[in-house]
Image (cartoon, rainbow, N blue to C red):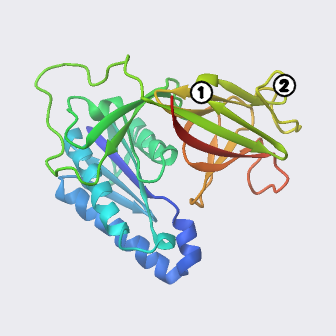
Amino acid sequence: MSVHATVVFTDLFGSTSVYEALGNAQATQAVTQVTNWIATTIGAHGGRVVKLLGDGVLALFRSNRSAINAVVEIQRRHQERMARVAVAHRLPIRIGVACGDVEIVAGDCYGDAVNVAARLSDLSGANQIWANNAALEGINEAEGVRFRVLGPINIRGRAEPCTVHQVDWEDDAASSLLTMQSDMVPLFDPAEVDTLGGEIELVWMDVKKSFRSFDLPIHIGRLRQAEFVVDDPRVSRTHARIDWRNGSMILVDLSSYGCWLRFAGDGSDLLLRREECVLHGQGEVSLGSSFADLSAPTLRFSVSQQPT
């Protein structure tokens, strides 16, 4: 059966480190409590939980407004919950939302929107909500909620890039959340730009360089002409590019063998193959080989926001 739905995929960021800190029994209990609470909140907003996936939840909504209301409430209430938990035991949530046609088969769901929602959850950071264009169609920003365009991002398996927005929320905002638009005024003004400029520091072995937003794009690779040269046979001549797009640092993989990405505080690794990801905070990028290869050329990165 084919239906038009808004897909929500939630994932607990950094659960691996919590398992290390608490042990399997306590960590499993903590993860289960959070995922069950997420499922209950989704149901309260009219969503249907399709399945629990370890530390993830997959759900469907008939209304994109209900879906966005639900994920904003999840982030706000979870922030309050985490404030009462030791830092080492916290489980931040990252969320992907996508609207489109979905195939329902034997109680499970499949389709492009499902894949996009899962991938946006993977690519986003802790406490973030990423949504595709269709998921925000017909919705107004409300007090404490802002839609920030990240631009087109390539997603594995899709021929066309997906325009992605970050749903920014504030913990002290009113709970009345979002309202429907009364007309067809565009959600975003392409001329708008962030008032902050960014800076990224890259470190490989004894090479350390910093780049401001106005220096971008820069290229990473074996070519001497690259702005950041990594001389290793596993690295492509032009392996990756870092762009400045709508107030965010975007890592773009250009290689044959991919980039492995790991953010500080999260035990999971993300593989990019001809895909993109927003860089935030601190982390590492392994070029041409996974982190399992201890000899792999690995960059450390640190992203900060600076006044322009």
**Residue 11, picture quadrant:** bottom left
User: Label 2 sits on what residue type?
Assistant: Leu
Task: Tell me what residue is drawn at x 36 percent, y 68 percent.
Answer: 83
Judging depth in this view, the residue of 29 and 79 nearest the camera is 79
Q: Which label was assigned to residue 243?
A: 1
User: Furthest-top residue in view?
Assistant: 191
Looking at the image, which residue is at 59% across and 75% down? 20
The residue sitting at 18% across, 53% down in the picture is 45
User: Which residue appears farthest toward the left when viewing the image?
Assistant: 182
Q: Position of residue 21 (x, y in %)?
A: 56, 77
Residue corresponding to mark 2: 223
Give the amino acid type for the residue marked by disc 1 in the picture: Asp
Query: Mark 1 packing: few (<14 Cα in 10 Å), some, or many (20+)?
Result: many
Residue lying furthest front: 307
> Could you tell me residue 57's position as x and y percent?
38, 58
Quadrant assignment, res 297: top right
Q: Dot 2, how many residues are within 10 Å of its Cα: few (below 14), some (14-19), or many (20+)?
A: some
Quick one: SS at disc 1? Answer: strand
Q: Are marks 1 and 2 in contact (CB under 8 Å)?
A: no
Residue 284 seen in render: yes
Say whether residue 1 is visible: no
Instruction: From the top left corner, tell me how far across and down residue 290 is, in percent.
Output: 74, 50
Q: Compared with residue 96, is residue 42 higher up or lower down, i.e. above or below?
A: below
Label 2, secondary structure: give it.
loop
Pick the residue in front: 4 or 70. 70
